[in-house]
Amino acid sequence: MIGIIRDALAFRNVVLAIAMLAWAGPAAPATTKLTIIAGIPPTALSVKVTKEFFIPEINKRLAASGIDFKIEWTEAWSATVAKLPEVFSTVAEGVAHVGVQVWAFEGSKLPLESITFNVPFGISDEVALTRVMRTLHDTIPEMNAQFARNNHEHLVSWSTDPDQLITKFPVTRLESLKGRKIGASGTQAQYFRNTGAVAVSSGMDQAMEAMRSGLYEGYPAPVSLMIPYNMHESGTHLTKVRFGATISSGLSMNKKAFDALPAHAKKIFKEVAWEAGLLHAKTARERSIAFEAAIKKKGLAVTELSAEERKRWASAMPNVAKEWAQRTDARGLPGTRLVKAYMDELRKIPGADKEIARHWDRE
């Protein structure tokens, strides 16, 4: 008798529990809290794309997946959590989870990501270059391994418009550079090796005043950054040398945080990051066109270096791609293999044969 009563009570408790669950409605979706950071303001293209497309699109697709999972984002832009050179390490340490990165600050940790700066005079098409970089990440394991070694998951690498040359003098031939002092940052200085120009180490934020004071007479930079850095106030000539579109920034995520995501969320993160990369490339191109028009309106002479002179310039330089490849090989990384793979991918692009000024890997 006691057993029957016990069973009846147990059954009643089960029924009550089911009723309470039904009354409470569906369970709240599982939530993961992620902090996303940048060392630059929301007006910067990379942050703008992240804030206005990447984050809301991920939220939208997670909601549409039918799986109870969502992200609660904390956005921290403008170096509020980490200064620009500290974003990568801050994400690696897990203080933040996703970062808008500038790969140039991580040359020692991500040497392979600098490939485009070390193989100049390639293509100007930002969208095509974004696709090339994705192929390299998909086919050369060391590209993603360099991120994993630093507790990062690579999400996407973004391209920007090609460096051009703003100067206080006309540049029509290679000889125009002889004896001229040109400001340059990092690997940009090698653009001027064996050209007769004298490279002066300088940051982009110093270019306007340095040209005005006569410290140097020109600076290579993407057109989309010349007006934001007020270079047009000191320069008088914009020469479209077309050093080649470059991969300068991107998105990466703390690897442990990425690995903890459910499978469908990982897939969504990768898909949306890739689409954000294409959007970034297209917008960079549009900005470049708009800023070039604005520079013309401000009275600067805008000219394009002839294909012949561009090839002369590239041919005058030492084989900087080979030098970089050998240095990278010496570190146990696939420098030579990467340069060849990169050039092979460029050569597959329709019309690229007319734009590639030097086949660095064939020498």
Image: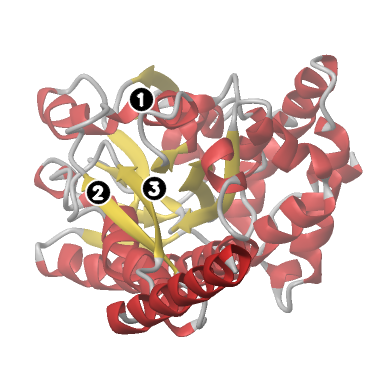
Q: Quadrant of the N terminus?
A: bottom right
* Residue on which the image places disc 3: 171
Please tell me whether residue 296 is drawn above or below residue 255 in the rendered image: below
- Residue 79 can be seen in this image: yes
> Toward the viewer: 131 or 188?
131
| Residue 115 picture location, percent across and down | 66, 40
Kindly report the distance in space between the C-alpha atoms of the residues bearing marks 3 and 2.
48 Å
Q: Answer with mark 3 or mark 1, whichever residue precedes in sequence.
A: 1
Amino acid type, mark 2: Thr
Q: Answer with mark 3 or mark 2, whichever residue precedes in sequence.
A: 2
Looking at the image, the residue that sits furthest to the top is 330
- Residue 317 can be seen in this image: no
- Tell us which disc is closer to us: 3 or 2: 2
> Toward the viewer: 299 or 339?
339
Residue at point 18% right, 46% down? 41
Residue at point 88% right, 39% down? 337
Q: Which label number is shown at residue 74?
A: 2
Task: Kindly indicate the quadrant of the structure image that contains residue 335.
Answer: top right
* Residue on which the image places disc 1: 85
Asked if residue 254 lies left or right of residue 222, the reply is right
Please tell me whether residue 5 is drawn above or below residue 243 in the rendered image: below
